[in-house]
Amino acid sequence: MLYGRAAEQAQMDRLLANARSGRSGVLVVRGQPGIGKTALLGHLREWAAGVRVLHGVGIESEAELPYAALHLLLRSELDRISMLPEAQAAALRGALGLGAAAPENRFLVGLAVLSLLAEVAGDGALLCLVDDAQWFDRASIDALVFVARRLDAEGIALVFAGREEFRPQGLPELWLDGVDRDAAVALLAESAGDLAPKVRGRVLDEAGGNPLALIELPSALTAEQQAGQLSPFTTIPVANRVQQAFQQQVRALPDTAQALLAVLAADDTGDLGIVLRAAESLSAGLADLEAAEQAKLVTVNGAAVVFRHPLIRAAAYQNMPLTSRLAVRRALAEVLDGGEHADRRAWHLAAATTTPDEDVARELELAAERARTRSGYAAMAAAYERAAELTPDTAKRSVRLAAAAVAASDAGQPTRAGSLAGRASEEIQDPLALAHLIQVRAHREFEQGSQAAAGELIIAGAERVAPLDAERAAYLIVEAVRCGWYASDPRLAEQAGRLLRSLPEIGSPLVSGALGLAALVTGDLKEAVTLMQELVLAPDLSALQVPGMLFVAQLCAPIGRYGQGEAAAARVEAECRDNDMGGWLTTAVETRLQAQMLLGRYREAAAKLEEIIPVTGDLGQRNGAVALTALLALARGELGDEQGCRTAAAAVLEQAGTRGLRAAEAVAMAGLGRLELALGRPEASLGILERISAANAPVSVFFAPDRIEAAVRIREPERAREPLAYYLSWAASVGVPSADAVVLRCRALVENDEDLYKEAMRAHEQGEQPHEQARTRLLYGEWLRRARKRAAARAQLRAALETFDRLGMARWAERARAELRATGDVPAAPRQADDPLSVLTAQERQVVRLAATGASNRDIAAQLYLSPRTVGYHLYKAFPKLGISSRTELAAIAT
């Protein structure tokens, strides 16, 4: 019986009931040691009659072995891996060491775990219990948190239990405090009912409602103390007092039994044979295991030995002196072979080594490389770091620290990566290792601090690399220019461009693109466009790696080639997903969605943004999340979601200013400015748009037409001159029909010239921006109405309305309707049929659009990082809303 946990039990029972009804749920139970987390999980398991249960317990000594905890959790279901899609099956087998190492892809591993758990739940509800989650290895917990964030309709209840330090973001949480006094009294009466009243009160006070303390503290008292002879009050924390109580129980055993428990505590294989062979060298054996079982410290079930509580494991190990702990580690290393236990052997050897030892360091280095093949970057970082600590040679130690820093960065641990990079020797001469160090330190700053500071770090590092490897220095400087672009920092861009020109020619078109981008940031539009076109329009870019391909995609927008940019970014995004390049994935998605929005596909972009922003948080890319949220503000504003736009923009502006994220700040402000313009408040719009400073020149070109329209609408055309001149210069440089059309529209506004409107309409026919064409039609229709050419005005306004409705641009559609009414027309009210998918949730729309292309549930699940059952659930919910009954009817509705 659990005392004082009725509310918590009820919450968990609801979670299980939902799973039985086909709905999934997640809960993170947190609290200090002994507070009752494991007991609550035990209650849930007892109530799970007829429900499949998977139960995993974190082991501290396994925390550096990638996917070790996941393997233990899933071990009873590994035969189901063959039921997964081939790519997922290969990724999961490789991660768990069950097959050849697959290409590194943490997202694919997470998706495979989601699919596997959904397969298990297909036989009925599934309860997945993750206890002592703070000791799960990073790769395993990342995969499980990935799953937790995507559960929906699989019938899975996933419950994590962990100490205070276990704090996954974005998951529902249950914090456990101590039980109340009445519950504590009842529990103590059950576990130690013969205590003297004074002692009972003392234990109640010291336990502070901690259930384990209420059970274990009395057992640490002598008979005299239980009868009332207590020492003066001490203030030792309750967890430490419980640990001491367990240590007293361990110390009551013979020395050989204590040694065996220490081996069992240090072991992480779960193999009793290994434990007994290691214990044999310490003169311990099976009789000692029996003694520990009789003392109720462990439970033996066949070949499995389990400590009664995790604190007993800690007590058994820490109870031994240092020399004995080293001997335990050596004993385990000696009995582990170099095959499946090679990583464990390396870590035991490292734990037994107190002075530099190249042989042990080399074994850890090999373990690190094995971790790389399983996408275990956190484990890889830990192995390289410990290898560096054991490396006698200074130069080699620096190289290993650099490798640890890169791995930590790949693992999404920018703070740890920066610390490791800082520890690497300043005397490192290997240009590749040095470049990696620079990139790691800059990446941390770029994602969590100042993007301008990241660029300055890169420039300083490139100056060191240049004498060793000019080509690698050049590629670093390309990244510095990109930092200057995001930070809208002309000084940084100018400095990077000057340094790039000082290097020997390396024959890469990326140099031209970087110089062009630097010129764009510093305000030289003509040179900027010319140089960027040299890269984007180069005949052969097949030799470029992902960063270079992404750079090309990013430069398409500043030269007005939006469709080309979307296609290029989509290719990079696919490459990032296939190869687990999470560091570049966010930027690839941002670039693709920016291009979609420039093409007028705001609804599609908004749905994807809502999906990817949480993933960006998973990757630790705080500034990337801000940039994506800025795009979301813009998209929501264009779609008429005033509250959504203002909320997203406020979130951006709150963070962007303090971290110098000027490009994101400008996009968010532009979203607000466009919203005000669409709402018919041009004066408010212009006030916002003019606050986008000249330092935001790289992105402000896209919003110059809005400033021009707002200025003309409030009859202050002089405030349109500067943005018009800037936009005219840019459009003349890029020479694409879409830009020409918008220039003609802006001139028509300022000059009040119908011929310019007509020229703009002709140019739009060759362009790729239907939303801009609709805005031109709206303005031309307004002009025609004022000129009393009502029939012609209606034609333009109806066409504009049709486009706005089709694209979901609600506020602009309202303006077009108002203008039509002013002509005497009676436009139809907004109809659901204009967007049949508008009745669906964002997730349902994504699923339906993909299903309409003929994609299977598994294909859709892989693309959206969902389980196939969740895809089926969304289709099941969507069909009645759409008035259809079969998948074959989707194509006519959703395409």
Image: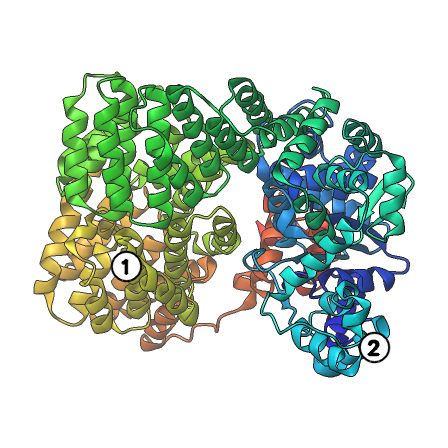
Disc on res. 658: 1
Viewer-side residue, 491 vs 392: 392
Q: Is residue 664 above or below residue 87?
A: below
* 450 sits left or right of 401 in the view: left
Across and down, in percent, residue 279 comes to 79, 32
How is the rendered protein coloured?
rainbow
Rendered position, 552 above or below 297: above
Q: What is the distance, in whole Å, between disc 1 and disc 2 at their CAs?
A: 57 Å
Residue named by callout 2: 189
Q: Nearer the viewer, residue 52 or 892?
A: 52
Percent position (x, y) of residue 850? 61, 46
Q: Secondary structure at mark 1?
A: helix
Label 1 or label 2, whichever comes before in sequence order? 2
Characterize the local packing of mark 1: few (<14), some (14-19) or many (20 or more) Cα atoms within 10 angstroms. few
Q: Nearer the viewer, residue 537 or 479?
A: 479
Count the numbered circles shown: 2
> Viewed as shown, does residue 391 lie left or right of 824?
right
Position of residue 243 measured from the top left corner of the image (x, y, whole percent)? 68, 57
Q: Residue 812 occupies which quadrant of the picture?
A: bottom left
Above or below 160: residue 465: above
Point 43% across, 72% down: residue: 827
Answer yes or no: is residue 369 visible: yes
At 7% from the left and 64% from the top, the residue drawn is 718
At label 2, the amino acid type is Ala
| Quarter location, residue 366 | top right
